[in-house]
Amino acid sequence: MSSIGETYEARSFFAAEWTAKTDRRALREPFENAVVSQVHDCGAEDLDRALDGVVAGAARVAAMPAMERSAILHRAAVLLKERAELISMALTRETGKTIRDSRQELARATDVFRFCAEEAIRIEGRHLPIAGSPAGSDKVAFGLRYPVGVVAGIVPFNAPVNLACHKIGPAFAAGNSIVVKAPPQAAYTLSLVVEACLDAGLPADAIALLHGDGALGAALVRDHRVDFLSFTGSSRAGLAIKAAAGMRGTILELGGVGPTIVHEDADVQLVAALCANSGFRLAGQSCASLQNLFVHKDALDAFTGLFLEKVRALTSGDPRDTATDVGPVIDEAAASRIESWLAEAKAGGAKILLGGGRRGNVIEPTVVTATTPEMKVVCDEVFGPVVVIRPYEDIGSVFQWIRDTGLGLNCGIFTGRHDVAFRAVREVPCAAIIVNGTSTFRPDQIPYGGLRNSGYGRESPRDTIMAMTQERILVFPDAR
């Protein structure tokens, strides 16, 4: 174990052992740019050994009693809680996430393992009504669920602990083995998560952890030994994975542009505070982060003043400081891209009401208005601390804009009118409509995911376990 300030050593785990490599990649902290981790990246031979190992382990995991898998996941939840401070600090140092957000992520991840442990003993089949036709009149039929085999879980940098647990927990609860491809930016953090799983009793041949770049992830996706693919990341990468998956099952949790609507009857005092938190938490690096903030013209002036006041009060800087609200974005390339998108918007006539500055990889919390639909800060996923205020008069035009994006993750809408809320759920093709909440709302126990180019399938302990099992029909002659 490394302590604060030390350089971490992020090894891979496969073929039932932690593996050290001669060639190592230096990972730098987003805030201070100091080397934080030495990463043992994997090659093609490592991937081959890892898959051979989990293929061999899949049958053993499938044969384990559900109560045993459940007990292991409960122990893993306990270990994550006991090691939360260690893992939180590694997460903050590697990704630049504020220490407050890292601690919150560890708490959520602990709950995910606990939910998965509970669901592991609830996997159930069904009795099928086969007697409704002459062919089945003398038969009885049952649908039974069995694990798919080997799961590949590809994890992003922005919530690596929680999203890794959303893949490891359901896969093991369902009786599968899993290969986890860690994000390059959070290698040591994921090593700590896998270590906790192994210490909890997860069989060593039931899990592999690989470090590497996109090429390694692509090779993992293409490999025929993988039976199911779970990916969280960009829409572009998700579409490529879907194309490569063929007949294999997938869960793809992809991107969005964070539409949230403040209708004319909203309580602007309350809404301003919620939107300020949602737009800039995690430095805006969330697929559901509030980005396009639609405000009815009758509420615009009051809301904007209150919103700017709340955003102005946010503290940006060192993510290890508990007073910091907004830390750095993940790296210099991301910071430069966001900076260029803001410059493009400004050159096109947009107004930056607040922020827009940059110190290293820290982008100030930024509020933009007077935009046009084709500006990148509007129609592309910023993945940074930028919120665009967009006045509207007719809510139908907002719904139409959301439809035209081709995306469909969460949509937030603040209103006390039930007719408006039900119109939104009828007309807005998003997987979740959050009434009196923002697009960022996500409790880990309910289905989460996107429609259209924002994803495929649903992620929650129960939903993912169902997706990672397959139904087989058993037909018997009726004994009567």
Image: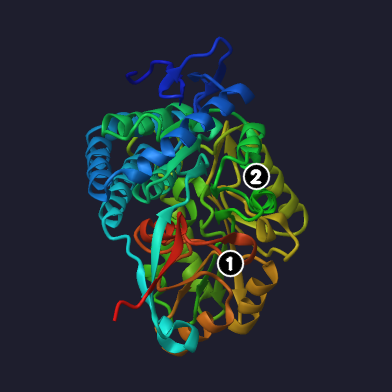
Q: Which residue is tagged 1?
A: 451
Please identify the quarter of the rendering in which residue 72 is found: top left
Q: Answer left or right for 60 relative to 301.
A: left
- From what the image shows, is residue 443 above or below residue 168? below
**Which SS class for mark 2?**
helix
Seen in the image, is 347 located left or right of residue 434?
Answer: right
The quarter of the rendered structure image containing the C terminus is: bottom left
Please indicate whether residue 405 sits to the left or right of residue 29 in the image.
right
Among numbered discs 1 and 2, the one appearing first in the sequence: 2
Viewer-proximal residue among 361 and 383: 383
Badge 1 element? loop
Please name whichever residue, 354 or 217, is drawn nearer the observer in this view of the structure: 217
Residue 84 location, x and y as percent?
28, 35
Residue at left offset 65%, top offset 62%? 453
Quarter containing the N terminus: top left
Residue 394 can be seen, yes or no = no
Q: CA distance from mark 1 to mark 2?
A: 26 Å
Extreme residue toward the top, this view: 22
**Residue type pointed to by label 2:** Ile
Specify the label residue 338 is tagged with: 2
Query: How far across and how far down the image is residue 407, in percent?
Result: 63, 65
- Type of the residue with mark 1: Leu
Picture layout, residue 203 above or below residue 237: above
Residue 474, by quadrant, is: bottom left
Residue 204 figure quarter: top left
Q: Is residue 353 above or below residue 406?
A: above
Q: Residues within 10 Å of mark 2 (few under 14, many from 20)?
A: many
